[in-house]
Image (cartoon, grey):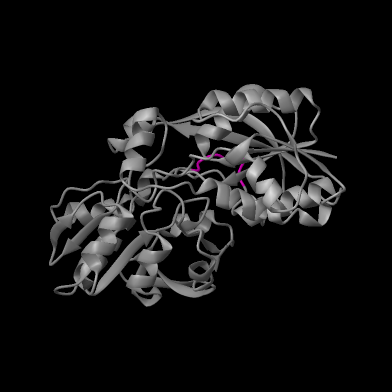
Amino acid sequence: MKLGFIVNPIAGMGGKVGLKGTDGKEILEKARQLGAYPEAPKKAKKALGILTPLIGDIEIITCPGNMGEDETIELGFKPKVIGERKPTFGPEDTEEAASRMLDMGVDLLLFAGGDGTARNIYNVVGDKLPVIGIPAGVKIHSAVYANHPRSAGEIALKYLKGELTNIREAEVMDIDEEAYRQGQITAKLYGYMKVPYERQLVQSLKAGRPEQEESAREAIADRIISEMESDVLYIVGSGTSTRPIMEKLGLPNTLLGIDIVKNKELVASDVSEKEILEIIDGKKAQIIVTVIGGQGYIFGRGNQQLSGNVIRKVGKDNIRIIATKNKIVSLEGQPILVDTGDDEVNNMFNRYMRVLTSYNEEIMYKVKGL
């Protein structure tokens, strides 16, 4: 069996510094200036590590350097490397690699990146061969990704061993990053790719929000505001479910970023991981976070500023989860998910936690660290 392996080394670099993506050379350079560092190679290695039992039994075709070669060699594989090592990386490199792997007859394409990377793969591969994505980007709307890097490895392992034969067509979605940074979500369906499917391991497409949920979000906001204590820093997560909190306080809301409130006044808006850590140092703080409808994540998708380091400093008992009943129903019994990239922090969440669903209603719901 032949496995194609592609890593987008710059995927996800804008997350912790609050840039909401890395599309475009200017944004990538800004991310680096703010102290961002590559996350995708580490996540890709977690996925590929699951496949080490197949060393000697599969052929891995990959790209030079940190586009896949480094990770495979570190794990003991002897890959076939295609293409030339380049000082910079762009979408055309992903497409060129995918095209060559398609021509070489790979049985499965395993790739690490975000929605932009999925689009690049789709532009070349379409529905011609099965793929599975390793989630490494800031925004992961597409359903071609596993729910965690290790899950991507598990899917690939089962598929290559012939133990997983169920294939589904999964959506490739992406949004306009420039509009995203301005607080507008403009999502577009680009097509479908074939994905080896196991419900527990593959993430769902992000669900939209019914308009009738507005009153539920308003009630949740009223409850949160009524509970706010003096001199406590409230780190308000991104999303439409948290927006009513800021609106009722009469404060500007970043919507797709992270804001900090104290004594019902704005302390800082659209903050990065570094800024959060500096502001809350030595102070009492609480995180208010919502569930992504359909997918179930509270950390690790679109809010990488709320990193493992931030969560450690705030403390797991100072995390307030909010979600309308419709969002909970959309999970179809699956747990709420945490994927911070920090295994120790993820494991802190393997328990039942309170979820505020209306002004006077809370439920206990299972949370799972990936």
Horizontal side of residue 87 vs 209, given as left or right: right
* Residue at 45% over, 52% down: 292
**Is 113 drawn above or below residue 316 in the view shown?**
above
Towards the viewer: 81 or 41: 81
**Residue 17, image x and y in percent?**
33, 48
**Residue 13, image x and y in percent?**
43, 44
- Give the prevailing secondary structure in the magenta stretch: loop
Question: In this rendering, does residue 191 appear at all?
Answer: no
Towards the viewer: 211 or 243: 243
* Residue 160 magenta: no
**Is 103 drawn above or below residue 291 in the view shown?**
above
Question: In this rendering, does residue 142 appear at all?
Answer: yes
Q: Quadrant of residue 94?
A: top right
* Residue at 47% over, 46% down: 38
Q: Quadrant of the N terminus?
A: top right
Q: Which residues are magenta?
A: 140-145
* Residue at 79% over, 26% down: 104
**Residue 172, image x and y in percent?**
57, 33
